Image: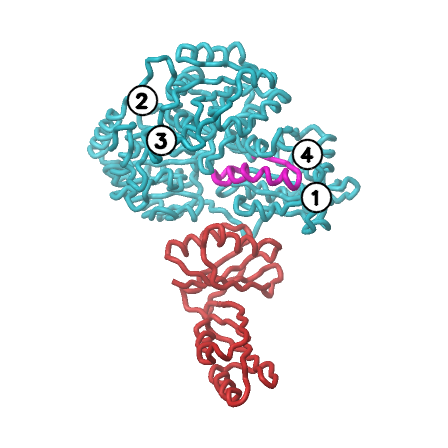
Amino acid sequence: MRHIISILLENEPGALARVVGLFAQRSYNIETLTVAPTEDPTLSRMTITTSGTEREIEQITKQLNKLIEVVKLVDLTEGTHLERELMLIKVKASGAQRAEIKRTADIFRGQIVDVTASVYTIQLTGTTEKLEAFIEAIGPNCILETVRTGVSGIARGEKTLSL
Amino acid sequence: MELLSGGEMLVRSLHEEGVEYVYGYPGGSLLHVYDAFYQQSAVKHVLVRHEQAATHMADGYARASGKPGVVMVTSGPGATNTITGIATAFTDSIPMVVITGQVMSHLIGGDAFQETDMLGLCRPVVKHSFSIKHPSEIPEVVKKAFYIATSGRPGPVVIDIPKDMTVPNDRHEYVYPKKVKIRSYSPPQKGHTGQIRKAVEVLLAAKRPMIYSGGGVILGKSHERLRSLVRGLNYPITQTLMGLGAYPGTDKQSLGMLGMHGSYESNMAMHHADVILAIGVRFDDRVTNATDKFCPDATIIHIDIDPSSISKTVDIDIPIVGPVDSVLDEILDIIKEMKETPDADAIASWWVQIEEWRKRHAGHYDKNDNGILKPQEAIEGLWEATKGNAYICSDVGQHQMFAAQYYKFDEPNRWINSGGLGTMGFGFPAAMGVKMNYPDEMVVCVTGEGSIQMNIQEMSTCLQYGIPVKIFCLNNGYLGMVRQWQDMNYEGRHSSSYMESLPDWAKLAEAYGHVGLQVDTKDQLKGAMDDCFGKYKDRLVFVNVVVDPDEHVYPMQVPTGAMRDMWLSKTERT
């Protein structure tokens, strides 16, 4: 099953390498990883999506917790949560296609952020499923390039992951 | 206000941590630090002949004393040579602080002479690591390193120090912190009382209980508590390779070691137990055999300070995360207040069953009548000569298993071996580390002619510092454990397991300035032991003991089987 693990870690050189190294050395799987400093510059917030059996996920969270620089972590998929990913996608847009692509982007609430005579670059935010649905709707023949940030997640309601 | 250079701060900080010996090897990036060493006498530096040996010396000392061992090596090859020793300590949760030199900060990343990315190299085998960015950080980083290495589940910590952090004329205010707080690190202080209570209820209701204890009991300095519990309940106990000695091996409640080469009675009792109390163990593959067949009837209680040890390989029914000392104290208190006692009839019939198992494999091994020693006999001879009181530092292989089986340890911290990583070459330097710190004790390296050659160069260090350890080499001319597997699984094809061209060991020892003794036959063993611990008490003695090359270590669990599935001899299976 897919899990979203959200980690608060010390914003120090080497901390990211320890997390990534742990996944590699114990042959855990990383599907996406995002990391950036928080409002407190001494802390980074990392979101990792991974999948595995219950025992594997338990080991992943325990082993992550053992890393000295990991301050706190939570498996967001254990409760209700929000998840978002940002995609920039460059597509061929000429002739009759142009209007069609614009309509599709509107339906998905995407924004065209760059335009040339033959190309649109569309910015789209949403869950992983939504981004994938958009890619499917546009069709592989039109797509020139995609770049995605990976998932960022946060718990719904009052729950916070903080010091 | 006191102003010190980074090098001076480092040496002073080690002194503040109570460090007496640092094991190491100098080189370009650490010359400022070595100069700081030279100008004081509180912290002594021991010059080894290979950096790997420095790590094992520090490790041996740590295992015997329960205090962290300290290593110091230069950058590049000096640092890479410590990796095996760091990994050895990491696998067995041994507290160690390893200080590695590094090229100057502005050269890092430029492929400078003797530059390696030590933090990257050691990352998977350390509990934590630090890089010094400014000389003034040194005292606090040292304090943190010792705190992390010794608290919670112990382990090695590396401090990487670029050369420009230790320059003599770059002086900064020195204050050694009394305490450090790391907001992201708080090892458990106490077990969950509800869980402990539940565990005690299950434990007292057991009909066929087993206590399975390991290295965590020794690391947690809790052998006395363990003994009170085991004796109070009159339950049988088996111990892991890492846990031997926490409970006396000669006591009747001890069933010996368990696992791949565990005793018949231990493995049978584990398989048939209805309740297992596991203390400071990690259910590793050399213990459990096939995990899906592991102890099918047992409710398992597991005490460990590391939450990731719980349900890692085997599902645990009642986990208790906490330090073994406080959890055992609480268990003992709850038992006292509950006024319930174990089912005496059930326990008595359980003991009857165990005694039957004990009898079945009572012979253990057959002696030769041609005068050639069996390795087991040699270990028994060593036990008699040392009255079971020596520190035994083992290498890795058949001799290690024979020592674990036949040298009955009655005290903790006396059996020192690389149980988890299985590092050949560990035993001799580990013995040196022990002997330097316990000069009045008998310290023996039990080894084989394969393992001893992986750090034989340290005989030179022993002469320089006067470290009279005893090397007890069970020489069968083969890499015995490899040969055993080849005999059992590869139809006796001994691929690269014969050690040809062995040296004359006595002459080798003499060339290094020590004493060499030769034992070719059974009748020579006692005399050699008498000389080793008598006439040559204060000398390093290399005792080359020729043993039967055909001998295998038994019992041996059958791969993919349950705990009870064992070979008991070359022809007999359970």
Asked if both marks, 2 and 3, belong to the same chain, the answer given is yes
Circle 4 Cα neighbour tier, 10 Å, few/some/many (<14 / 14–19 / ≥20) = many
| Label 2 and label 1 in one chain | yes
Q: For mark 2, does the 10 Å Cα neighbourhood hold few (<14), some (14 to 19), or many (20 or more) residues? A: some
- Residue B113, which numbered label? 1
Question: Which amino acid lies under the numbered mark 3 shown in the image of this protein?
Answer: Gly
Quadrant assignment for the N terminus of chain B: top right
Disc 4 is placed on an element classified as loop
- Counting residues from the start of the chain, the first of labels 1 and 4 encountered is 4
The reply to the same-chain question for discs 1 and 3 is yes
The magenta region covers B69-95
Residue behind mark 2: B365
The quarter of the picture where residue B175 lies is top right
Q: Secondary structure at mark 2?
A: loop
Query: Mark 3: which secondary structure?
Result: loop
Residue B392 picture location, percent across and down: 47, 24
